Image (tube, rainbow, N blue to C red):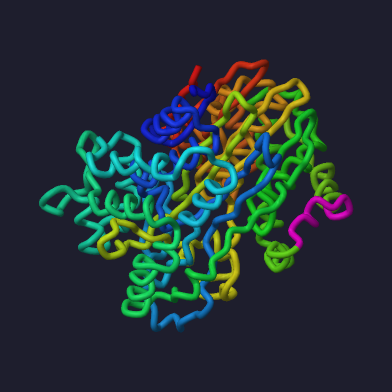
Amino acid sequence: MHTSGVVAAGHEQTARTAQIILQDGGNAFDAIVAAHFTACVVEPVLASLGGGGYLTAHSIKNKNVVYDFFVQTPQQKKQPDNIDFYPISADFGTAQQEFHIGWGAVATPGTVKGLFAIHKDLCTIPMRELMQPAISLAKEGVIINAFQAYIFEIVHAILTATPASRTIYCNQNNKHLITEGESHQQTQLADCLEALSFEGEALFYQGEIAQLIMQASERDGGHIGLNDLSCYQINKSAPLELHYRDTTILTNPPPSSGGILIAFALKLLEEINLKHVDFGSVQHLDALAHVMALTNKVRLDEHFNSTIQHAGRHLLDPDFLSLYKQQIHQRAQVTRGTTHISVMDKKGNMASLTTSNGEGCGHILNGTGIMLNNMLGEEDLNPRGFHQWTCNQRMTSMMAPTLAFSNHGQRIALGSGGSNRLRTAILQVLVNLTDFSMSLEQAVNSPRIHFENDLLSIEKGFDQSQIELLSRHYSKNALWKERNLFFGGTHAVMEHQGKFSGIGDPRRGGSTITIE
């Protein structure tokens, strides 16, 4: 039985898989699980069976729930001198970012267990059928598009770090990365996916794949043991709920930090009436930049980082917020590897899923085609410094799959990739929708800014005269010459008065399909 709906994702094949499942009668959760498996094949730098993520779900059956299947720190920590852990540089063109890779950068993955948990609770189609599109694409090969080729180049140092990774990501002579227009075939990954479709999550967390992960860690300088995998648990919780203007927003709660920081920023923006200023004006951009600066100040606060694992929500306490709202009023008004999938269906189900592999650890798990994550080597996820993580603890993340319900009847599912930039991307899309009454397409396509480490990054597309005025207040600024994945990739879908719409962010190769 055909199911109407809409999907937005980071690759045409990811979106097409969701379309196939909806056309076969599946619901939004069937579609998003199948699409995630496909993303592991067609967006391999951004999604992996060796990573982790979150789903924010609104179901007609179970109402609102967040599935946390992000990575976990290992139960035991080896000394830094005894691990495989080293830096590489990713080149975004206008900006560079350092990441650390190696077996010592791998945290316990949650993706496989998360997808099977979502399937058990919310899906209607057998897992083997949901995995079949991904298996077929891995076997037959996928033509690399321009965006994936660009991503490959950015993390060239990771994809060519080991002989096994070069075998998968380089052309036949192993000298050059696969590029746009070439076929990317992953037969080992296809076999691994097929085995998982028959044997289930136990293969990954207790069986042969678990053994491979443990052996590689013991032999080559990683932290993960069998107990890390067998003891890994999915966390399910109520979403963080807040109200901004005339919209109710549901997002990822603590211990993830992205959702609470977006909520904090929106609460600060409530003090500024953006409806009376123009989009892209110096007033608008200065307000955004200042709120971003205050949000970063909170993120780097030692008390925040020590409590995010437990309380976290205290950021929205009125007394705490008042300290930062005062700074809004006192200020003179001036004249990563991450991908996201959003799906809705006609039954009212909404699914917003963000997933990440970091950038990958550089190693391929023997015989599986899987590159595990490098989350222990992500500076954004280790604000106290590398090797300072607490053992056996869910890592915090900026990922914030989000649902929004306006008083005007609009229902929206959105999220973004982009490391620290993903939360400012989501923030700006929400502000564009609520304060500037933009269409979904306009809200995503409009240019963005990002403020971090005293640097204001400005995407091309704003009025030059307003940027010149703004630059007087931010001596350190970088004006980008084009739209770029640096500013996130917000793939979003909407239902309003029975009509579906969607937009895949072009900054990250986005694609959208509406199923009538």
Segment tinted magenta in the rendering: 311-320
Q: Magenta stretch containing residue 349, yes or no?
A: no
Q: Magenta stretch containing residue 312, yes or no?
A: yes
Residue plotted at (62% across, 26% down): 347
Residue 480 in picture, x, y percent from top left = 46, 37
Residue 85 seen in render: no
Main SS of residues in magenta:
helix
Task: Determine which quarter of the picture holds residue 380.
Answer: bottom right
Residue 22 seen in render: yes
Q: Is residue 244 above or below residue 292?
A: above
Residue 344 in picture, x, y percent from top left = 57, 29
Q: Is residue 457 left or right of residue 45?
A: right
* Camera-nearest residue between 91 and 170: 170
Residue 78 in picture, x, y percent from top left = 46, 82
* Camera-nearest residue between 468 and 313: 313
Q: Is residue 71 left or right of residue 214?
A: right
Residue plotted at (52% across, 24% down): 3
